Image: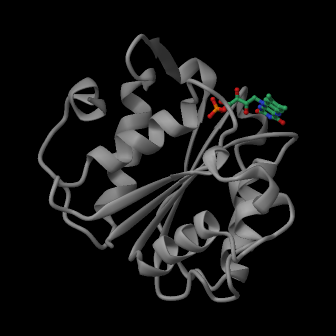
Amino acid sequence: MAIVALAGSPSDHSRSTALLRHVLARFPDATPRSEIVLRDLPPAALVRADVDHPAIRRAREQVAAARLVVVATPIYKASYSGLLKSFLDLLPQDALRDKTVLALGTGGSAAHLLALDYALKPVLAALGARHFLDTVYAVDAQFTPHALHGHVAHDDVVERAERALADGPLPLRVATDPLALAA
Ligand SMILES: Cc1cc2nc3c(=O)[nH]c(=O)nc-3n(C[C@H](O)[C@H](O)[C@H](O)COP(=O)(O)O)c2cc1C
């Protein structure tokens, strides 16, 4: 598995998940990837830290197999989502060693622009991550609602994601239309 994508929003029509999917769509179809929508994991297993639950075991295996880990989260109370923390707590120590990590975040305002750096990255580093691509943070006003995809990120956000991915370990597809990519 080349890529694992962690969608850390509890919401329907999530902006951070839309951004995550845009990033995923930047890779050629042949690039193996898995998307873990954390809100779809069994809640009792998450809350009880039941690492033997089949869904949790499978998610841990998907992370273990990935070369690039893309983590997307909304900013909640000046930090990343509790849902994401519940999942990260279930990963083994060093789960992210030797992987490249890209953190994506969305917030209501720019006030918590640095939350991914001061709150999320230390946790990812504690899990062994050492190679981080440039963080991409966007505010709600930088998304347009979309009937099919929930939201579509504005061009300036897409461009920042492109620049971050250009430093990544995997080849990208040649495509520029955000709606085509999100399809
Ligand atoms: C419970 C809750 C707490 C939030 N706290 C913050 C916050 O501290 N700072 C901020 O900028 N936005 C905050 N927001 C706004 C969300 O971060 C923002 O709408 C984000 O884009 C939602 O991402 P999503 O659509 O992927 O769920 C909060 C939203 C909720 C529901």
Where is residue 133? Give x, y as percent. Answer: 46, 65
Residues 63 and 68: in front is 63
Horizontal arrangement in the rendering, residue 37 relative to residue 26 (left or right) = right
The quadrant of the image that shows the N terminus is bottom left
Q: Is residue 20 above or below residue 97?
A: above
In the depicted structure, whether residue 174 falls above or below residue 101: above
Residue 137: % across, % down:
58, 42
Q: Looking at this view, is 128 or 32 the one in front?
A: 32
- Percent across and percent down for residue 8 are 64, 48
Would you say 162 lies left or right of 94 here? Answer: left
**In the image, ligand 1 is in what quadrant?**
top right
The residue shown at (85%, 59%) is 47
In this figure, what is the number of numbered marks? Answer: 0
Q: Residue at x 30, y 73 (%)?
A: 169
Q: Where residue 16 sits in the image (x, y, percent)?
A: 56, 37
Colouring chosen for the image of the structure: one colour
Task: Pick out the residue farthest to the left.
Answer: 174
**Quarter-wise, where is residue 154 in the image?**
top left
Residue in front for this viewpoint, 82 or 158: 82
Residue depicted at x 46% and y 38%: 19
**Residue at image x 44%, y 35%?**
157
Q: Is residue 79 above or below residue 95?
A: above
Write down the quadrant of residue 139 in the picture: top right
**Quadrant placement of the C terminus:** top left
Q: Is residue 28 left or right of residue 133?
A: left
